[in-house]
Amino acid sequence: MKSSSNSQSNSSSNSRWARYQALELLPDSAPAPYVGNLFARNPLQLVWYGLITALTWEHFYEKRVGYLERCWRTDYASPYTERPSLKLRQILRLLK
């Protein structure tokens, strides 16, 4: 049963390779890429990959939280407390 799933996987990857080869106009002599199990050789690679993935997501969430905290700290009242005539004068001065 395991060999039949492997043969199905190989046939689908072969058909994908044939389609890619035809679309990219690759010659028939071009070898098909090796498709193997990423972690079959060393189980530590799986642990390392998981660690890197976790650290990447943690960094992403830290950046997002930091950005949101900076946004919430912004004082939105300050633009409305200035006199609008000063802004209008600045705009008219720039248009001249």
Image: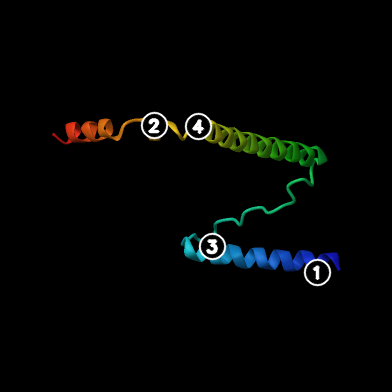
Q: Earlier in the sequence, mark 1 or mark 3?
A: 1
Residue 30 in the image, given as x and y percentages of width and height: 55, 56
Tag in front: 4 or 1 = 4
- Identify the element where label 3 is drawn: helix
Q: Based on the displayed image, in which of its 4 quarters is residue 4 positioned?
A: bottom right
Quadrant where the image shows the N terminus: bottom right
Circle 4 residue: 74
CA gap, disc 4 and disc 1: 61 Å
Q: Residue at x 57, y 37 (%)?
A: 68
Q: Residue at x 66, y 37 (%)?
A: 56
Q: Earlier in the sequence, mark 2 or mark 4?
A: 4
Circle 1 residue: 4
Give amino acid for label 4. Answer: Thr
CA gap, disc 3 and disc 4: 51 Å
Give amino acid for label 2. Answer: Thr
Circle 3 residue: 20
- Identify the element where label 1 is drawn: helix
Q: Earlier in the sequence, mark 2 or mark 1?
A: 1
Circle 2 residue: 81
Residue 64 in the image, given as x and y percentages of width and height: 59, 38
